[in-house]
Amino acid sequence: MKLSKLLLSFLFMILSCGKESNYVPVVGVNFTAALNDPRMSRLNVVGGAVAIEGYGVAGLIICKRADNVYVAFDRCSTVNPEKRCGVTIDDSGFSATDPCSGAKFSMFDGAAVKAPAVRPLKQYHVYTDNFTIRVTN
């Protein structure tokens, strides 16, 4: 009897330890643009941010932080990522809002700053030289 309870408990634990599926999917990203491209014009100022469609899960957001570092995030909200709801850049350029849940994220590091978000936005690598910006994963 004890052995069957132990086996049943063990089986339950094994079956309940599946992969969590509530994460933004992994997709290949390879975006390159000239820094003087009109789409990138908002990156000429600190706090400037641009949304780029057609890359990542729900598009990209590229930002220029106060320390002159460029960062890039997937627009896919980490709240119910299976819905692929793209966050929108707030007027300040320092945060983005998920229109589906109301969650907010920092454009400095992608951190969740307002519930129901608990995970940061998915971040990508950014490389720049004097003329181009490249976002990859």
Image: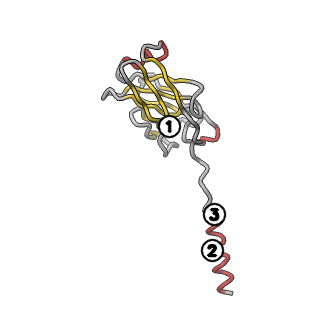
Disc 1 vs disc 3: which is toward the camera? 1
Disc 3 packing (10 Å; few <14; some 14–19; many ≥20): few
Disc 2 vs disc 1: which is toward the camera? 1
Which of the labelled discs sits on residue 46, or is there none?
none
The kind of secondary structure element at disc 1 is: loop
Q: Is residue 58 left or right of residue 65?
A: right
Foreground: 102 or 30? 30
Q: Is residue 128 left or right of residue 76?
A: left
Residue identifier under label 1 = 137
Residue identifier under label 3 = 16
Precedes in sequence: disc 2 or disc 3? 2
Whole-angstrom CA distance, mark 1 to mark 3, is 31 Å
Residue identifier under label 2 = 10
Q: Position of residue 92 (x, y in %)?
A: 41, 23
Disc 2 packing (10 Å; few <14; some 14–19; many ≥20): few
Whole-angstrom CA distance, mark 2 to mark 1, is 38 Å
Q: Position of residue 15 (x, y in %)?
A: 66, 65
The kind of secondary structure element at disc 2 is: helix
Q: Is residue 14 left or right of residue 102?
A: right
Residue 78 occupies which quadrant of the picture?
top right
Question: Which quadrant would the N terminus be assigned to in this image?
Answer: bottom right
Q: Disc 1 residue type?
A: Asn
Q: Position of residue 93 (x, y in %)?
A: 42, 24
**Residue drawn at 53 percent across, 23 percent down:** 52
